Amino acid sequence: MERRNRNILVLLIALVIVAAAFSSFGMEYFAGNTPEITLPEITRPAGPEGEEPGRTDGVIRVEVTPDTVQGVVETLERPASYYQEITVTYGAAGGSLTAKQWVDGGWSRTEAALPGGMIRHTIVGEGMVHYWYGNSRTWASAPGDQRSHDLEGPHIPTYEDILDVEKDHITRAGYEEKDDMACVFAEIIDSELGSVSRYWVSVDNGLLVAAERARGEELLLTMSAAGIERPVAAGTVFALPDGTQLHAVSVQPQQ
């Protein structure tokens, strides 16, 4: 009798376990209209993960304003060795100037075709400026400074023009695209001449790639740079008309 009661008790416990398992797993199978649970989507902030405001491709873009543009331009680093071609147009009927410039190792060599066709040759280096015209075999020399290499001679806009001006003459500044290049832009007013000058300095190579000067709606001058190569071809020589070699470009890695 006791054994029989024990068997009945074991059977009842087994039935309870089966019933509990059926309640947990079996009812979901038969409940056809059980609502589906959907997890919310995670919305990530735009831009690369961890990107800081004002940072693009790992480079922090400093805000450019009339108050800061001179400091920004001054920190842009021009390549130590480069070649470029400059075209300057003076007004509606003032002619144009074209120039070829080689810069390497602190030296600069320029061939500028002036309005009228005369060629001015300039070599700048080691604190001196040497210049002559056409096929002349003689030249003149004079002390230079750290900015003389910027196409010394007939005035061609350079980014030093931005650095030399009084800050309160800078009316606008910022980042702009010019000729498909990202540039630092600055607009400078000359109240005495009643003109406005605008400059575009490439963020990529630190060179002035475009400039213009206007009075009202009239363009007095436009300048553009093209054909930029880095570095200058090895073997290029900077020499005076008598053949005296002042500098020669050596083999160097691409910049």
Image: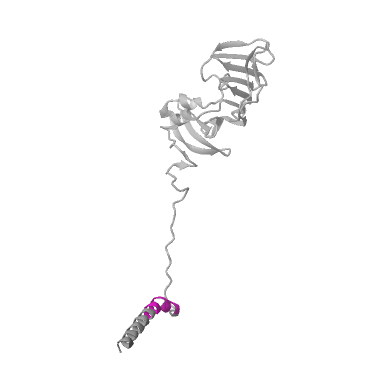
Q: Residue furthest right?
A: 135
In the image, 152: left or right of 244?
Answer: left
Which quadrant would residue 69 be assigned to in this image?
top left
In the image, 202: left or right of 246?
Answer: left
Q: Position of residue 210 (x, y in %)?
A: 56, 32
Q: Main secondary structure of the magenta part?
A: helix
Q: Quadrant of the N terminus?
A: bottom left
Q: Nearer the viewer, residue 54 or 38?
A: 38
Q: Quadrant of the C terminus?
A: top right
Q: Nearer the viewer, residue 59 or 188?
A: 59
> Is residue 210 visible to the viewer in this orientation of the structure?
no
Q: Position of residue 71 (x, y in %)?
A: 44, 29
Q: Residue furthest bottom?
A: 1
Q: Vertically, is 153 above or below 231?
A: above
Span highlighted in magenta in the image: 19-29
Q: Is residue 24 magenta?
A: yes
- Its colouring scheme is one colour
Q: Position of residue 206 (x, y in %)?
A: 53, 30
Q: Is residue 194 magenta?
A: no
> Is residue 187 visible to the viewer in this orientation of the structure?
yes
| Residue located 44% across and 56% down the image | 43
Q: Vertically, is 15 above or below 236?
A: below
Q: How many marks?
A: 0
Q: Vertically, is 220 above or below 130?
A: below
Which quadrant would residue 211 be assigned to in this image?
top right
Q: Nearer the viewer, residue 96 or 147?
A: 147
Q: Position of residue 247 (x, y in %)?
A: 62, 17
